[in-house]
């Protein structure tokens, strides 16, 4: 089966062609980084317009690179939720029109399930049960999965997503957008213990995440210690910026590792999956491997091009649904917020002794 995947939930317009093995025949991504760079974050109105401009050329590029014609496509898969509504609508409308015009079925894919399938695309089916950490610009969720395509929520962020914290801190320091790769690079040169930053835990025993405290602490530090603004992107940065990048990254990774460790102690997974843009982070990957692999728990993550938003992961998530005939119809719409699962695993409260 040849599936054309389409993704437009945030600031990447992406299209990919996947064959049924599954094998990625092409994965084209038009990034909007240049458009949003000056604003230090994604501007929704501009994003929708860019998607409109890019969607047709990106689909053409994916077809060309896969060396297939539109008439060879047997199924169209599209991200329907969650994300920026205007952006999602461009992909959904385009996919519905293609499905109708080609007379082929449509599969609607949840963006977070796409991120899960990016890791499956890389490694093949997971050893279950799996703990899955999805950390991106818009999401921070920890899921438990005992079988393929079935998810229970262990924890999620109560305020900012991990990638959002990276982007906001980079903006504050004048480092540009997206902040994750820039801070990741600078962190390698700084001292992670230079500035102690808070790693929030909730007193009710919940493993939920919170990153707004770290961000606020950085704002306060910059003001109190008169930390200089960053130098131009390609110039050497002052030592304080390097140390702050390293300390921030240390706090974010420490928080994520703490939650996944505590969940693993309770749920005994056979693997830990890291996915979503922040899972590109070298420090994060290394810290998780170092902790879990000696215990025989595999740490799986996709290659960087499949870790950030792409359409190969959307087509991959659609494949089992297409095989079962779970198709969407032309009434399908886009939704800004839809949870991947409504089932939540209660965690024991370590503060209670019964
Ligand atoms: O998955 P993604 O492309 O889009 C969303 O679904 O949000 O993730 C983008 C996010 C951005 O916040 C970006 O700063 C972050 O992933 N990111 C990173 C790294 N590379 C990208 N964060 C930390 N370290 C990185 N190396
Ligand atoms: Zn994403």
Image (cartoon, rainbow, N blue to C red):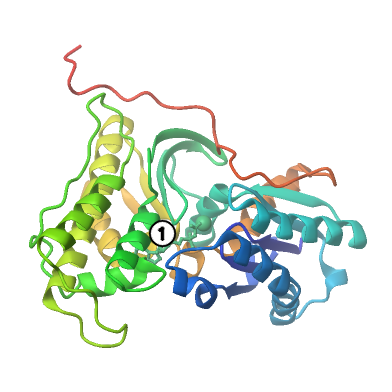
Taking the spot 50% from the left edge, 74% from the top edge, the residue there is 33
In this rendered view, identify the residue nearer to me: 148 or 328: 328
Residue lying farthest to the top in this orientation: 354
> Considering only vertical position in the picture, is 43 above or below 344?
below
Q: Quadrant of ligand 1?
A: bottom left
Image quadrant containing the C terminus: top left
Q: Position of residue 165 (x, y in %)?
A: 34, 55
Image quadrant containing the N terminus: bottom right
Taking the spot 60% from the left edge, 75% from the top edge, the residue there is 30
In this rendered view, identify the residue nearer to me: 254 or 229: 229
> Considering only vertical position in the picture, is 139 above or below 151?
below
Decide if residue 314 is in sight here: yes
Question: Quadrant of residue 73 in the image?
Answer: bottom right
Per the image, label 1 sits on a secondary structure element best described as loop
Left/right placement of residue 152 relative to residue 286 reads: right
Disc 1: which residue: 301
Left/right placement of residue 14 relative to residue 216 reads: right
Taking the spot 43% from the left edge, 55% from the top edge, the residue there is 136
> Considering only vertical position in the picture, is 269 above or below 28?
above
In this rendered view, identify the residue nearer to me: 197 or 189: 197
Q: Position of residue 70 (x, y in %)?
A: 84, 72
Left/right placement of residue 126 relative to residue 318 reads: left
The answer to whether mark 1 is within 8 Å of ligand 1 is no
Q: How many marks?
A: 1
In this rendered view, identify the residue nearer to me: 229 or 116: 229
Left/right placement of residue 47 relative to residue 295 reads: right
Label 1 Cα crowd, 10 Å radius (few <14 / some 14-19 / many 20+)? many
């Amino acid at each position: 089966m040849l599936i054309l995947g389409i993704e437009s939930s945030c600031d990447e317009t992406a299209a990919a062609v996947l064959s049924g093995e599954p094998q990625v025949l092409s994965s084209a991504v038009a990034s909007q980084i240049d458009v949003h760079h000056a604003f230090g974050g994604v501007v929704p109105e501009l994003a929708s317009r860019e998607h409109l401009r890019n969607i047709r050329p990106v689909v053409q590029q994916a077809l060309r690179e896969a060396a297939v014609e539109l008439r060879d496509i047997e199924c169209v898969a599209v991200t329907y939720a969650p994300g920026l509504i205007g952006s999602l609508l461009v992909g959904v409308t385009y996919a519905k029109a293609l499905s109708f015009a080609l007379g082929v079925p449509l599969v609607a894919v949840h963006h977070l399930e796409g991120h899960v399938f990016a890791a499956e695309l890389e490694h093949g089916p997971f050893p279950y049960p799996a703990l899955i950490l999805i950390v991106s610009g818009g999401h921070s969720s920890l899921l438990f999965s005992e079988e393929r395509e079935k998810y229970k929520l262990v924890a999620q962020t109560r305020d900012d997503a991990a990638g959002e914290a990276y982007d906001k801190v980079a903006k504050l320091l004048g480092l540009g957008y997206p902040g994750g790769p820039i801070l990741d690079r600078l962190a390698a040169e700084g001292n992670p213990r230079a500035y102690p930053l808070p790693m929030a835990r909730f007193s009710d025993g919940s493993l939920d995440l919170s990153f707004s405290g770290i961000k606020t602490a950085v704002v306060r530090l910059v003001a109190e210690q008169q930390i200089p603004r960053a130098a131009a992107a390609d110039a050497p940065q002052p030592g304080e910026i390097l140390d702050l990048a390293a300390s921030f990254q240390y706090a974010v990774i420490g928080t994520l590792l703490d939650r996944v460790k505590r969940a693993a102690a309770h749920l005994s997974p056979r693997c830990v999956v890291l996915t979503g843009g922040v899972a590109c982070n070298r420090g994060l990957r290394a810290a998780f491997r170092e902790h879990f692999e000696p215990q025989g728990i595999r740490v799986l993550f996709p290659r960087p091009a499949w870790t950030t938003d792409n359409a190969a992961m959307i087509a991959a998530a659609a494949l089992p649904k297409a095989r079962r005939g779970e198709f969407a119809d032309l009434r399908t719409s886009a939704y800004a917020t839809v949870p991947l699962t409504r089932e939540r695993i209660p965690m024991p409260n370590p503060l209670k002794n019964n």
